[in-house]
Image (cartoon, helix red, strand yellow):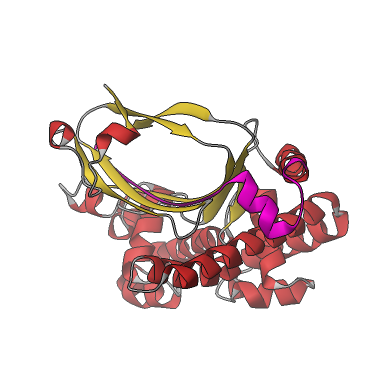
Amino acid sequence: MQISINDLFNATGNVQDIWSLSVKGHRHILHPVPGVTLLEQSVCASKSVEIVEQAQPGLYLSFYSSASTKQKSSLKKHQRANHNNDCVQVTYLPKTASGTFPLEIDTSYNLTQIHLTPERCASLTGETEDKILSYFLEVGDKLGNKGNVITLSNTHQLKEAVRPLLVCAFGDSKSISLTGKIYNLFFEILEHLQITKHINACEDCQNKILSGQNLLEVAFSSTRSTKEIAQAVGLNQTAFELGFHHLTGQSTTHYQKHIRVKQAALKIKDSPEKKSEIVMGSGLSEEEFEETFLKQFGVLSHQYGQIH
């Protein structure tokens, strides 16, 4: 079954009654100034559905996450971890494009997205629309996939820019304040693209990032902060986070969790009676630990010793 995204929601942002047995969710759209759109959207399908949507030309900054909604057993309960929310997708469309997006059954898809028209991008940067297009085509070719979609790590710096934006957008703040925060995020993204572009061409920076990865593999380093690891190899935290994701395809947060849980699993195997102490020593909450452990080993931590 295919549903147009524009037909799915009513004027208040709720799912139309005709689709409510198959899809749940909401959509909130703001236009603080001409040429700028902020979208916050969540959908979950109980049947096989494909969403059809059309995108207008311009720059899209997209923060995605997805999570299973099944909670029928303790195993399912711990499979609610979000995916892809450690990154932001940057896409520049030179012309109108359309496509379909399949929804997996019993999975919630959440999207926060900012769209700036070519005219608005040109106005903000003081460049012509042609130069803006050339720039994004160039960085998309160097850093993006076949569709010129660039995936950047959602760094601590970006999170600091996004958090007040969302509070402002869905609170009682005025549009002028929201617009300023969107513009701030826009320039943060441009800076992140420049840093990643440099790292992509700099062998010295790449070697520093790989040295940082080696430090994360060492037992005593796995609980050190990303900032401490970055400083140890001679980079700032933002550059290290961006470069790490660019070279490994993983965020530093995800990788650190992987290492901490891997090390904890060895300790639990040898001393299962000390599990609570070992989990606490990992630096993760119990929920984070179990979610990561299940994804990594396919079983919950209390079942690990019975299998290995």
**Observer-nearest residue: 16 or 302?**
16
Left or right: residue 16 compared with residue 236? left
- Tell me where residue 129 appears, x and y as whole percent: 72, 44
74 magenta-colored? no
Q: Quadrant of residue 234?
A: bottom right
Say which quarter of the image contains residue 96: top right
Image: magenta residue range: 105-130
Q: Residue at x 39, y 71 (%)?
A: 167
Q: Quadrant of residue 15?
A: top left
Is residue 232 visible from the viewing direction of this image? yes
Reply above or below: 102 against 188. Answer: above
- Does 24 sit above or below residue 3? below
Residue furthest top as drawn: 1
Q: Can see residue 104?
A: no
Residue appearing at x 70%, y 40% in the figure: 140
Residue 109 in magenta? yes
Q: As rendered, which of 169 and 258 lies closer to the eye?
A: 169
Judged left or right of residue 245, residue 256 is left
Q: Give the x, y percent position of residue 183.
A: 58, 64
Looking at the figure, which quarter contains the N terminus?
Answer: top left
In the image shown, does 136 or 126 lie closer to the viewer?
Answer: 126
Residue 187 vertical position relative to residue 128 in the rendered view, above or below: below
User: Percent position (x, y) of residue 101?
Assistant: 40, 31
Q: Does 90 sit left or right of 104 as displayed?
A: right
Front in this rendered view, residue 33 or 100 = 33
